[in-house]
Image (cartoon, rainbow, N blue to C red):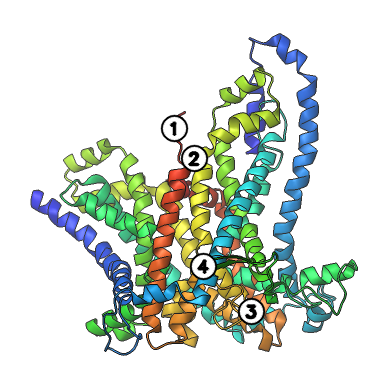
Amino acid sequence: MSFGRARFITGFLFAPILLYAVYVLYPYAQTAYYSVTDFSGFSPDFAYVGFGNYVELFEDEVFLKALGHNVVVLTVFPVVTILLALFFAFMLNVGGRGDKAGVRGVRGSSVYKFIFFFPQVLSIAIVAVIWRRVFQSNDGGLINSLLMAMGLVEKDKPLMFLAEGESVFPPITIGNFTFEAPVVLVCLILIAIWGGVGFYLVLFSAAMQSIPKDIFEAATLDGATRVQTFFRVTLPLLREHVSVAWVYLGIAALDFYALVVGMTPGPGGGGPNDASQVMSSYMMSNAFRPSRFDSFAFACAMGVSIAILTLLLAAVQLRVTRSRDKLEF
Amino acid sequence: MSHLATTEAPATPAPPAAPSKATGQAKPPSDEGRVFNVFSHGFLFLWGALVTIPLLWAVIQSFKTDTEIINDPLGLPEQWLWGAFGRAWTKGHIGEFFINTIVVLIGGVTLTMLLGSMAAYVLARYPFRGNRAVYWMFIAGLTMPIYLGILPLYLTVEKVAKALGLVEVIGLNTHLGLILVYVAYSLPFTIFFLHAFFRTLPSSIAEAASVDGAGHVRLFFQVMMPMAKPGLIGIGIFNVIGQWNQFILPTVIMKDEDKRLLTQGLLELATNARYETDFARLFAGMTIAMLPILAVYLVFHRQVQAGLTGATLK
């Protein structure tokens, strides 16, 4: 029996562990290893160079620019997405019949959820085909042609959107870093918000529905209005969910690769003039379009840096937002 | 949720303890309710329009002529033409991409579910030395961004296939090669989710079956798998959507023109649209690529919403 049990356990775990070790863990380890060498990606002769790649990385103008863009995305995208999702969840839940705010929904709330959530299941290719055309920088684009029809934009001076590298605010320089928000990056953030709000709306809305009704009844009995109930009762009880959402959106903000590759000009995306370059897009285009002899190793150092930054961010966010006293119901 | 509200309405009588307060407040809340109703529907409708208009607009472009697309972007087609769909399928290679994607998806999801549930089951219900270590090894994969492994992955797939003498089978540009990579990257999440699920299943049935002489393997396939069906469906849909939309892995592994997957191929069409003269074809290709996912979403939207958001909180 015990022999059969051991054989069973080994038999069931063998293939999953093998696949995972070969295709996931081994490449991770290789990235870390190559990042301290001068490996070109092709030549089998390469040498250990220590942490030189990392030092150069934080002197690399484009990488710092890309990092700055990620920071801009990180400060704007999660906050706006969470606020909009909370706002719509509030609208879905406080509107509607009855006086027990927060428990019912407005009429047709599942239809709204169905529509809002849909962009979440679309692939980057579909999003790219649609939004490239929406933001197109001539009279064939949706927004430009709409504005021209309304007379707000002149036909020979269309809005440039994805082709515009100018920052929407004057660049702020702190030491090596320059923070700026090029128009093209703002467009990408808008698309990301468009895709993400529905997901977090559903998340928050489900959380609101799971709050026991007697809490709302008690609040109503005490004479609280819907708005008061939302801010004093519902929102504090959603703390945990907002915290999780923030971590996920933070991770997504440090990524952004698919949007940059799918939407922006230049080989491998990132244009115009690196105005929409983020860390991951710079890493990928650097590895495949060598600009230096050890570009593969250099890109690996970027991969490790992205991983470390992502883990640090998640850890910090969890520490900041996790409430000490957890409420169970 | 709205149908729930109507059935529940009569079942919640006003609390008897506060009749005076309730009557005193009867008017303000109902007014407040109406104002909020108009207000919230207004905002919700606006966002609904922002989500749907770009989608519908893009779909409509596939029925237009190129002249209409360029000169009259806002208008409806004078004649609803279906030709672009055929051109996208054949000349745009969407058909090939589509079939490649289906092959990889069927293999990928089936194998992910099989191996994932096997591992999750053993880890959830068989204590042994090293159980926790194996579990955490898989969970660690959840926290790592894909960029950490993506560059050497290409070399790994090549090397492993060469070492085994299977370059044509699991090497670069092969369906099976990509399937194995998909499975490997889907395992952490699948195991994490199903592990929690297998833990909640009652052990009494398993014990009864084992007393009746069922072996471990039979117990798993004939008793535990059927009991875990809701969890398997949820994570199965999750994997279908994830692998259907996957884009970074195929870009690295499927370089050959005729081996491309849908997301990859369509994105290529979109990025090269500047040199393209057939715009309707591009939009038709997009519409074709959207249909399967729309169908899955129409049927399973509740499970998709609950599964994706629920998974976030685990």
Label 1 amino acid? Lys
Marks 1 and 2 in Cβ contact (< 8 Å): yes
What is the C-alpha distance between the residues marked 2 and 3?
40 Å
Which one is closest to the eye, mark 1 or mark 4? 4
Q: Residues within 10 Å of mark 2 (few under 14, many from 20)?
A: some
- Which quadrant of the view contains residue B77? bottom right
Tell me the tag on residue A67.
4
Residue annotated with mark 1: A326
Which one is closest to the eye, mark 4 or mark 3? 4
Residue annotated with mark 3: A272
Marks 2 and 3 in Cβ contact (< 8 Å): no
What is the C-alpha distance between the residues marked 2 and 4?
29 Å
Q: Earlier in the sequence, mark 4 or mark 3?
A: 4
Q: Is residue A15 shown to the viewer in this render?
A: yes
Label 3 amino acid? Pro
Q: Residue reaching furthest front?
A: A175
Residue at 71% from the left image edge and 88% from the top image edge:
B277
Count of marks placed on residues = 4
Q: Circle 2 sits in a helix, a strand or a loop, which is it?
A: helix
What is the C-alpha distance between the residues marked 1 and 3?
47 Å
Residue annotated with mark 2: A240
Residue A307, relative to residue A116: is it above or below?
Answer: below
Which quadrant is the N terminus of chain B positioned in?
top right
Q: Nearer the viewer, residue B161 or A134?
A: A134
